[in-house]
Amino acid sequence: MAEPPVIIWEKEVESLLRYRDLIPRLEDALGKFSKRDSAAVIQPVRTTVPLQKYQGFLGVMPAYMEHDGVLCAKMVCFYNREAGSTLPATTATVVVLDPEYGNVKAVMSGDVITNMRTAAVSAISAKLLMSPEAEILTILGTGKQALSHYHVFTELFSFKEVRVWNHRREGAEKFRLSVSGAVTVCNSAEEAVRGADVIVMVTRSTEPVLFGHWVKPGAHVAAVGACRPNWRELDDVLMKEAVVYADSRDGVMVESGDVILSGAEVYAELGEVLNGTSLAQREKTTVFKSLGMGVQDAVSAKLVFDQWKSKPSKLRSGSGFDS
């Protein structure tokens, strides 16, 4: 008889996940995904169920990595919240299963996993695509994703200036006070973007807030928001002038309004760049359109579970369903 699954709560996940461990695993997973080898990764495009009453969606994101023995699924609810809403924009749960027996081995909070793996993949895109002389980082948006992106980008790279903008200035000021490094709060998105070398888009916007004529030639944009086919963060000018990269071609052609509505061509997946089958065009303006993938959650959850199992039992804060 299989042991009951463990529950790993948010604080425990946070204590177990580190970017230095996570990033190499994500690079490996992105490369495997882009090879389209079903023995390495099987991952369908995210299935969504509309939650019309609450202006949201339930997304289901399974992935199976046969060679690695990983079977995982994330369920994430994401919402188009009103400005100033105190309700979360996303809430996620990750389930790890035994691929041979089919039983659930672990259920864990997915919010930290979502925030950290998303930011880590954006940082991978910057490592591959931003100018080596990049000095100015701009973050548009000040929610949890903004914080996770700030942490990983300042951990991995040395920027001379970090700028932030939010449609509510109090949100930007709160963000500034919550981080340890110096942050410049800008009065407008344009002010924040002009001259920036790397621009991180983590807004809740459904209409473009970043315009191509603001963007410095050769800048790199990591676009994380606008995860529905009718939502936008970036305008047509930027999408058509930039070299566009994605985590998954299949995913962006179904879910990304920035790609679908602009008619932009996706040049390559990040995994193809990591595999050496596509070029990193650093000298050009680049956009990485991130939607997130089940395989990213799978390797993150496996890392959390492996780290949890390696701890002495008396130090584990997770619990079984029967406890």
Image (cartoon, helix red, strand yellow):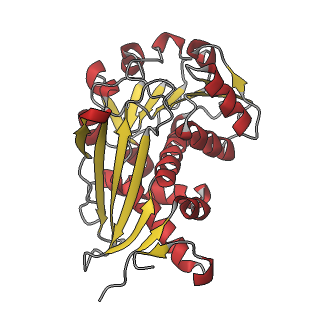
Relative depth, front residue between 79 and 251: 79
Query: Which quarter of the picture shows residue 15?
Result: bottom right
- Quadrant of the image containing the C terminus: bottom left
Residue 195 in sight in this render: no
Compared to residue 67, the image places residue 189 above or below, namely above
Q: Position of residue 30 (x, y in %)?
A: 40, 52
Q: Residue at x 42, y 47 (%)?
A: 91
Residue 285 in sight in this render: yes
Q: Position of residue 49 (x, y in %)?
A: 22, 43
Q: Position of residue 294 (x, y in %)?
A: 34, 54
Compared to residue 249, the image places residue 100 above or below, namely below
Q: Residue at x 37, y 80 (%)?
A: 4
- Looking at the rendered structure, the number of numbered marks drawn on it comes to 0
Q: Residue at x 44, y 37 (%)?
A: 89
Q: Position of residue 93 (x, y in %)?
A: 39, 56
Q: Residue at x 48, y 30 (%)?
A: 85
Q: Residue furthest top?
A: 213
In the drawing, does residue 170 fall left or right of residue 69? right
Query: Which quarter of the picture shows residue 174?
Result: top right
Compared to residue 273, the image places residue 159 above or below, namely above
- Quadrant of the image containing the N terminus: bottom left
